[in-house]
Structure formats: structure tokens, C-alpha cells
Image (cartoon, rainbow, N blue to C red):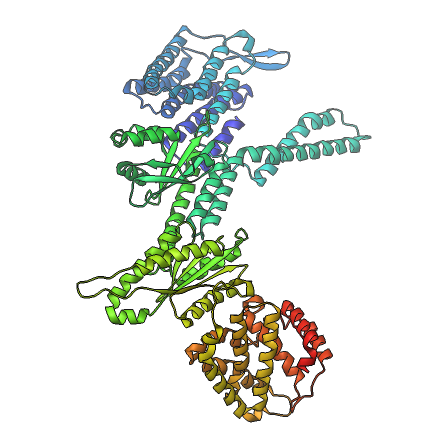
Amino acid sequence: MLFYLFILLLYVKSEKNQLLNSFFLMIGSLFVWTSGSFLMRGLANPGYIFWFHISLLGLFLSIISIYNFLMDYVGIKKTIFEMILMGILILLPLVNIEDGWFIKSPVMVNDHGNIIMIYEDISELILIPICLGLLLALSGMIRIGKKYKEDKKFISQSKPIFLGIAFFVLGNLLVVLPIFKSFPIDILFGLVNAIILIYALIRKDVLNFTFIASDANGYFVSVLLSIIIANRYIGRHIIETINTENLQSQLTMLLVIFLSSLIFIQLIWKKIVIPVVKHEAIYFNECLNEFSAKVAYNLNTNSIIHEVIEVFSQLEFIELVSFGKRVTSTNYYEIIESSKFTLNNKTIMINNGTQEFLGANHGLVGIHELMNLILYKSAWEEEKLQLRTLQMDYIAGINYTQFLLFIKVIQGKKFKIRDLEFLNSILSIADVSLRNAVMYEKVYLESRIDELTGIYNRKMFYEKYDEAFISQEISTTGLVLINIDDFKLFNQLYGVQNGDSILKEIAEIIRIETENKGMVFRYSGKEFIILLPSLDVYSSKQIVEQIKSKMNKLGLYSSDFQHRTITASIGISVYPLGASSKNELLQNVEMAVHQVKKNGKNGVMVFDTYEKGITEDLDYSKVYENYSATVCALTAAIDAKDHYTFNHSNNVAEYAVKLAKEIKLNNVVVEIVRQASLLHDIGKISIPENILNKPGALTDSEYEIMKRHVEASIEIIRHLPDLDYLIPAVIGHHERYDGKGYPRKISGENIPLTARILCICDAYDAMKSKRVYKEEISNEKIISIIKKESGRHFDPILVEAFINVLETSVTEFD
């Protein structure tokens, strides 16, 4: 009776539907039956005969409600004939109340002090309700048989229902046997029936038990059962054998038994009841929450797809899960990721009709269900064969069928309703996340594609360039800068439209030659840059020669003219042999292009920072002779303003050249270092003389003015285009290795190598020189200071090299 009452409480917490209503009508009938029988045997008021008739009414209601539940469970509507039979069965126990015309109330018998109920007067008219019940059962069996012919899986799905009803019928037949005259076998088997039917509903995910498994319910059940145990086995014994002398010990024993039972039952509740009742629901909720948290702000499609496959692969009933992505403008899908690598890169064809069907369903669709559709039967044989070959059980369309999900279930396993709801919830979340990710990636890519040429732009280059150096898998990285010669003149001669056409053709040539080898970007209006991961100098140069050859053959013909040959100045450098950092690598290719331009254009130069790298023989005296007059004029201007600065710049140039040669820099870099040293303080022309020659320490405001000489130097140099290659060295000569310098506060190898050389040489000469505000410092002390500042102010590698220069050239410097 308590069990049925407990089950009725579930009705309040469960989601209502027709099947659940039928089930709880049945449980209510069983509750009336068992309650009446219990109160009858307990001789409760207003008398056992009253409770007999209540019990009999509950029994007949139970027969009708069980049949009603069975029909609803298997999905069969009741006929009018069956409804009439059920109505008659309800009236029979009411008719029996007057004189017990088919079964009279039981007789009370005293069996050795125990009152038992025995049914002695059973009329032959009992056959009427029995026959009506059998007729109702026969009608149901016939209709269920027809259902089985239509669906062979029906019987296996309904086995628990038939088993429960069998127990119920058996219990009511056994009750008439003498052996069970004092044992409520009918009620016991009715209880077994109810338990089996509850199991059937749980399998269908109709009943929700999760609310039961709370701590509050656990404490209540533990206390209640502990009281019953203590009262049943200990309390009664104390009352019957009460002894004032050992009452305290008996009460102590009672308390021990109560507490032991309480702890034991509470342990069972937490370790067994809660995990069994809540395990699946909690697991699914946790998975949903965890998955949602991972993909909610994820804008990477591959990452989202991986998360979907991860969460599905963890489910015990799924053997294989795969994701397919539609190949642009086709009906083919490529398997891009799978829980088993055997399917990766496999291609499958899905026609438009099937795509529309999957897009409209918003969830998993069984492959067999799909194969029964007319749209599938009308599909190409190739598509049918591919779907059969995949041997998948379910398919789902995601993001308007841009993606397809395939699932293979472990043989013998079946999805429950809750399983499907969970999987579809995951797919719903994934669908929204993938739509956002696809939209973001589209916008992201459009912002990184050059509108004219269709290749990546400068913004994308910097991202991929950084990624190439972050990756630890790439041992070498080649970089190529292509600068089209005299392109401004080409536009003036032939028009911007023809110039744009040439740019498109050049971009396509570079794209084809670098396909599967590297990435090409439009670096500026007339420049392209190529990133070649894992390629050495020789391979990079081969690619460049192919590009250069094809560019030279580009033609723009008409009846009146043929345009001038397209040429380019190209620079190549490879990390780590030709450059020690990504910044240096980029500076090298820019310097290589600069050198080719100054040496006549239309050439290729492999530029290495160090001596071993330059493969072309250039006459550097010719390259720089055009600049010497400009450099001399600027240094003369410094001398007119501040003779110290002039001498200081010459000294720094001497030290810097020796240091550059000490670390084996090539002649180009050595010359850049020399010129940058001569001009690094040219901006001091703009500093007031009272600050330049102040005998004491500068105030904070004066120091800020003095620091501006760096920007002033750059302003002067940048107006001399032929000297702009000096800017990286000049702008960084007051930066510190630890990032505390100025003006940009960059650190480490982010500071150009030429600037790091100037920094240490500039500091050395400043300490060594005598000024109005300081005395000369000895070489020994300067070396000590430089060593102390290694890794803080100065590059540690350059400190070691510079000290070596000082030790070998001390007499010359003195």
C-alpha cells in the first residue's frame, strides 16, 4: 500500500501525457485494492465487510485500468465493444454489494490467536466476471497480434508489460487455492506487476525518478526505517522484558541499533540509490553543460566539430561518429573528422532532396527511415551505394546541411527516448555554435583577403608569420619579398586598369608556383611576400626563379604597342641560417630588395645577416657612393651645432663597425651600422644648446626634451628616401634589452640587431668621453659596468663580443 502511495506521488513530479495518465489510473486502482484488503484484514472501522467491497471494487478497477494501460502503451485505440465490456466490469462489484451474488464477504477464522480471512461462499456466477475479463483479454490479444504482424519489433519492446500482466492474473488465480488461504498472494503479485510496469515506463523515459534522490528524502527514509527496525526488533523486546535494573543498558542498545541502522541506510541511499536513480540524468546534464560551456564562445568550426565528436564518443552505445562537410557548390560531402581515422577524407554524395529533408528535421534521422522515403528511392545508385557502404545508423543535418553528422550504434544497443533527446540537444547547441562560427570565419576571411587579387593581404601575413614562428615543428622558414619594378610608371603609361590586370596575373603565377609549398600575400600596392615553411635557401630560390621567369613573359599586346617587360626586385632570406629572429628575417628580405633596387633592379638576392649568406657579388662602394655626400652633409650640420656630438658619432661608428665585423655580419649590414652610427644623434640639432651643454644633471622635463632627439633623427632621415634603411637602427639605439628603454619600450630580439649594436657602442663612448657634467671613466670600470648590465641594458651575446673587441683593440681605442 505504501509502495503504491509512493508511486502516486511520482505523478505530481512527472510530465503529464496519455500513457502516464493511464499508468497512474492503474496505480490508483491497485492502491484502492490493496488498501481495502489491508484494512479488511486489520478489521478497521467501519468494519471488514465494508473494506471487502472497497477491495473488490479496486480489484475490478485494476483489471480495467491494466487493460487500458496496455492499449495505450502499445498505441492501440480501444473499440466501442471493449469500452462496453469495461463498463460492465465496473458495475459488477457495485451489484455484488447488496447480497454478494457472485462472491460473498470472507469469513473470519481464529487460527491459534491469529485472525485470518477465508473465502468459503463463492457462487457459480463468479464465471460472469471471469468470462467478461477473458473476453476483454481475447479482444486485446487479437488486436495485439495484428500489431505484431505490422511491426516485428513490437513484442520485444512490450515484453515487460506482458510479463507484469501475467503476474497479476496468476496472483488472482492462486488466491483460491487452500495453500494461500492466509497469505495475500494476489496483493504480492499485484505489487510485482506494478514494479515491472514501472520498469517499462522508465525504459520509455516516461517516469522521472530523479527528484526522489535528494538528501532530504534520504534523511527522511533513513530515520523512518531506522525507527521501524529499532521498534520491531529491540523496542518490543524491551517493553516485554522491562527491568529497571538494566533499563539503561537496554536503552543504550536501542540507541546503538537506531544509529547503526540510520548510518547504514543513509550510506546505501548515497552510494546506491542516488547513483542508480540520478546517474544517467546527471551525466547527461553535466555533459550538456560542459559541452555548452566549451562551444558557446567558440568561433572555430574545426574545434566545435571536435567537441561534438568527443562528447558523442564517450557514450557507451555509440561505436562511431563522423562529421562531413559539403564541398562548395556540389552535392558531395567530405568526411573531415571521425572518431576512427578510417573514414577521414572519404567523400559521399547526398542529393538536394535528401539535404532538404535533413535540413527540415533538425535532429537525428535513422538511415533505414531515410531509405524508405521516396526521395531516397529516386536518388542516384551511386548515392545509395555510398550510404550503404558507410554502414551508419543515424544521420543529421547541421547548419542548413552544410555539415552532416553520421552515427553508428554498437550492435545490440538501442537508443532510448532520453538518449535521443540528449543527442538532439547536443546537435541543437552545435548547430547554433557552428552557424556563428561559419559566419565569423567568413567575415574573418573576407577581412584578410585582398579584394583585387583574391590572395591573402598584409594583415593575414602577420598572423600566419607569427604562427610559423610559434610552431615548434618547423625547423626552417623561408621568406621571399617581390617588389615589382617601376610599377608606378607602368600605371602612368598603360592605365590603372591594365596595371590591376597585371597584378592579378602576377598573383596567380605566384599562387600556382607556391601551391602546397607555402602561402602568398599581397604585402603592399606593388609587393608580394611569400612564406615558405620548412624550405631552405636552394628550394626557395628555385621557386623564385620560376616566378621571375613567368613574370617576364607577361604580355599586354595590341595593334599599336606591346608593353614593357615586367621585372621585379626580389629578396630571399631563410630562418635560422640567415636571420636569428622573425623581425630580423623580415628586415633581411626588405634590405635584399633595397640592395637589388640600388644595384640596377630586376634581380634576386639571398640576404643573410652574417657573412656566409650573400650569394651575389655586389660592389658596395657603388651601392652607397650616392649616399656618402648626404651623410657627410648631415654630420657637418651636427658638427656646426655640437662638436661633441660629431666626434661622438664618429667614435660610435668606429666601435660599431668593429663589433659588427667581430660577430661576422656581412658587408651590407656593416655599412648600414656605420652610416646609422654617424647619423644616430642627428636629431640633437633640434635640442636647445642650454640642455645639450648643461654642466649639471638634467631635470625630468629637460630629460624628456633630450629623449625627443630620437624621433627628431627619424623625422630627418625619413625625408631622405634613399636613407630610410637606416631607420630601424637609429630608432632603436636607446632601447634596453629588458624593455625599459625608449621610445618604443621593446625588448630582447624585438630590438633590431643593428640598434642593439649601436646601443652598446653609444653607451661605451658616452662613458669614456669627458663632458662638462662628468669625468672620463676608465676602461676597466666601463667593462665592469657593461658586464653588470648584460641582459638588462645590453644584449648578452653582444656584451661578450664587444668586451673581446675592447680587449684586442684597447690601444687603438685609447
Quarter of the image that includes the C terminus: bottom right
x and y, in percent, of residue 480 in the image:
44, 60
Which residue is painted at 67% across and 80% down in the image? 812
- Residue 551 falls left or right of residue 166: left
Which residue is painted at 44% across and 30% down in the image? 409
Along the viewing direction, whichever of 145 and 85 lies nearer the viewer: 145
Could you tell me if residue 707 is visible in this image? yes
Q: Is residue 259 above or below residue 726?
A: above
- Residue 701 falls left or right of residue 340: right
- Taking the view exactly as shown, the residue that stands out farthest to the right is 245
Could you tell me if residue 744 is visible in this image? no
Q: Quadrant of residue 529?
A: bottom left
- Taking the view exactly as shown, the residue that stands out farthest to the left is 559
Which residue is painted at 41% across and 45% down in the image? 430
Q: Is residue 260 above or below residue 593?
A: above
- Taking the view exactly as shown, the residue that stands out farthest to the top is 124
Q: Is residue 206 above or below residue 40?
A: below
Which residue is painted at 37% across and 35% down in the image? 395
x and y, in percent, of residue 465 in the image:
47, 59
Along the viewing direction, whichever of 189 and 529 lies nearer the viewer: 529
x and y, in percent, of residue 777 in the image:
70, 83
x and y, in percent, of residue 385 in the image:
33, 29
